[in-house]
Image (tube, helix red, strand yellow):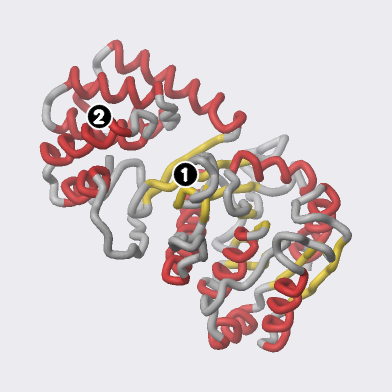
Amino acid sequence: MKRALLIIAIFVFALSVLAAPKSWKQMAMDAIQQGDYQTAAVHYRKWVEADPTDAVSLYNLACCEAMLKRPDEAMRALRMSSDAGWSDSLHTSEDSDLESLRSRDDFQALLSDIARNARTRHGGYTGHVCAQERVGEYLMVLPEEYDPAHRYPLVILLHDHGSAPEEFAQVTAFINTHDYIYALPQGPYTARDSDGKGFSYFRERDDFSEDVNSVAAAADWVVRVADDVAKRYPVADSTFWIIGFSQGGALAHITAAYHPTRVAGYCAHGGYFVKNAISPEQLAFEARAGVKVFLTHGKEDPSVPLMEGVYAFNLLKQAGVDATLEQMDVPHRFTAEVGLRVGEWLKEKMGE
């Protein structure tokens, strides 16, 4: 647990939030920032009593207990975190907050269980965590013949509203399984209509509309994930590519507009512009930065009408962005046909 904030974070990332009563979890994180591990432990116990599936908070509780010189309580919380799915054994083995536990046999045995989680969670995809106001998780898909001595372009995949990274990771089979490193950030919010199993990149209002005040933080989250990946894997350079579907396409638009010097190019399939989220000045900056854009959209898309894609395309072209729109005979789904076309576009643009 990094003492500046939270746990396995390599950096700190604060989501802008609406004024609202703080949860036990938020209050625990505030206490950690102040170095008050006793109060943080009390709040974390209350939080995990209500949500015993929150592996990250259980890990944080273990760190607090270890810092308070309560090793048995720390091991109990760490074991519960492992049971809940905590999967970063490397960080656990190196975390200075757990120094007092390293000589224990049960700690070393538990590291094996945590490593096993990394191989079995999320359909076998590799997962890492880094910090926002709350911890955000992202998954990795590495090339079939991954060579750590080789440097790969980084492609960020952004799932649709109500989905999850492990579901969208399957599209890599259509795009390219050899030449890219993929990272899939999980939306930081639970989608309100998904029974807790799907996620949203933007905060939702009571009427389920997207809160424009949350879009900048979502774009920052994508960049933070790219930075974290670069610390762990051999990526080609500081820029990256994005492939987003539906809401993920909307976030691709926003990330490129807010961070045009970091985004080399992006594809938005079935995407749209979030109202009042992107200014003409941002689009002009995106054009000057040379961001490449490929929009694909179903001609009869019942969920996000084709006119949304046309509207986005027109705004991009008017701003001078290098954008292409391709209308396809597909539903509101990232099909194999879409993946193959996107793969061709990526290969073409990366080779320019």
Please state, as top left, top right, bottom left or bottom right, where the N terminus lies in the image.
Answer: top left
Question: Where is residue 59, by image quadrant?
Answer: top left
Residue picked out by circle 1:
137
* Callouts 1 and 2 close, C-beta under 8 Å: no
The extreme front residue here reads 207
x 42%, y 70%: residue? 213
Q: Nearer the viewer, residue 92 or 157?
A: 157
Q: State left or right for residue 91 relative to residue 172.
A: left
Q: Is residue 268 visible?
A: no
Say left or right for 308 vs 344: left
Q: Secondary structure at mark 1?
A: strand
- List the residue tagged with mark 2: 62
Q: Quadrant of the C terminus?
A: bottom right
Q: Residue shown at 34%/60% (left/top)?
A: 14
Q: Which kind of residue does numbered mark 2 sit on?
A: Ala
| Kind of residue at badge 1 | Glu
Residue 314 placement (x, y as % from top left): 73, 83
